[in-house]
Amino acid sequence: MLERRTTSRLRIALPNKGRLTDDVRALFSDAGLELRAAGERALVASLGGDFEAIFVRAQDIPEFVADGAADVGVTGWDLVRESERDLESVLDLECGRCRLVVAAREESGITTLDDIAGNGNGGPRVATAFPRITERYFADACLPITIVPVSGAAEIAPHLGIADIVTDLVSTGSTLRVNQLREIATILESTARLITAPNVVESPRRRAIEELVTALESVLRARGKRYVMANMPRAALDQVRRVLPGLNGPTVIDILNGGDFVAVHAVVAQDAIYRTIADLKALGGQGILVTRIERVMP
């Protein structure tokens, strides 16, 4: 067990492996928090400045944060909910998107929760790696069940006869379909979250947490955006405003010896770039330049 406090730096628990690891490390790197570890198997790394990282299993991160071994952590919201610890989500990192769903064999005839009936022996058996969430969900639905805990690959349980239905994480649902299982309900939607204990938010480390959130949020806000610059006829500015709404409208700058042209700058959604360029050219735009954005601050 790590000591609760051996450094004045903000300690961040990060997943050491699994589906979130690469996305989370890339996000921190883009935010200027480059991991500096002594080796690939190091359990602790510097993130520069007032931050350090510890690497633990994603499912253990809620416990580390709740118990004070880490000030904040990054893990899936599904694991936070399963832990039942008193934790707060301070930022949705918008990666690791998945759903926890209820599924049954296609030939079972079960298509909705209303089709799930008790068998007189404690209700249908539900195989799951999320027993707490699953039990709460079915209790709220007033459906008695018997939990069959599994550590993974819950989708095989109905085929082995050890469970009638399953609750399992899905991204696209393709694994369920391959195993002849049908989704019948969604329990929760999950993404990677930056979490902390409520008492930490009000502690002297609050400022460091706010700085961390600001750095990560600025990168997330820039994703899917492009910066567009163009020289446009002054007479066309009313139409340009409709083409380039930007965050707060386009920035218009006089050009030295520009005559009837002004420089127009704006942030545009990446998926709208093709149409934006075509519209600007149609309005007489010249010297159109599109660049990537690393960060956007409100």
Image (cartoon, rainbow, N blue to C red):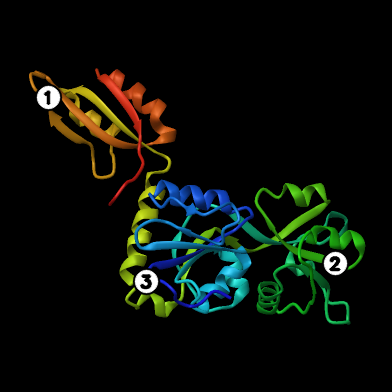
- Label 3 or label 2, whichever lies nearer to me, is 3
Q: Pick whichever, 6 or 176, lies toward us.
A: 6
Tell me which corner region of the image, top left, top right, bottom left or bottom right, holds residue 162.
Answer: bottom right
Q: CA distance from mark 1 to mark 2?
A: 71 Å
Q: Marks 2 and 1: in contact by CB < 8 Å?
A: no
Q: Position of residue 208 (x, y in %)?
A: 34, 66
| As drawn, 88 above or below 28 | below
Q: Residues within 10 Å of mark 2 (few under 14, many from 20)?
A: many
Residue beneath the point at 21% across and 30% down: 264
Q: CA distance from mark 1 to mark 3?
A: 50 Å
Query: Where is the N terminus found, in terms of image quarters?
Result: bottom right
Secondary element at tag 3? loop
Tell me which corner region of the image, top left, top right, bottom left or bottom right, holds residue 216.
Answer: bottom left
The answer to whether 273 appears left or right of 236 in the picture is right
Residue 8 marker: 3
Residue beneath the point at 76% across and 66% down: 151
Mark nearer the N terminus (1 vs 3) = 3
In the picture of the structure, the residue carrying the numbered disc 1 is 255
Secondary element at tag 1? loop
Q: Marks 3 and 1: in contact by CB < 8 Å?
A: no
Identify which amino acid the numbered label 3 is placed on: Ser
In the picture of the structure, the residue carrying the numbered disc 2 is 164
- Label 1 or label 2, whichever lies nearer to me, is 1
Q: Residues within 10 Å of mark 3 (few under 14, many from 20)?
A: few
Identify which amino acid the numbered label 2 is placed on: Asp
Q: Position of residue 198 (x, y in %)?
A: 43, 78
Residue 235 marker: none
The answer to whether 211 appears left or right of 13 in the picture is left
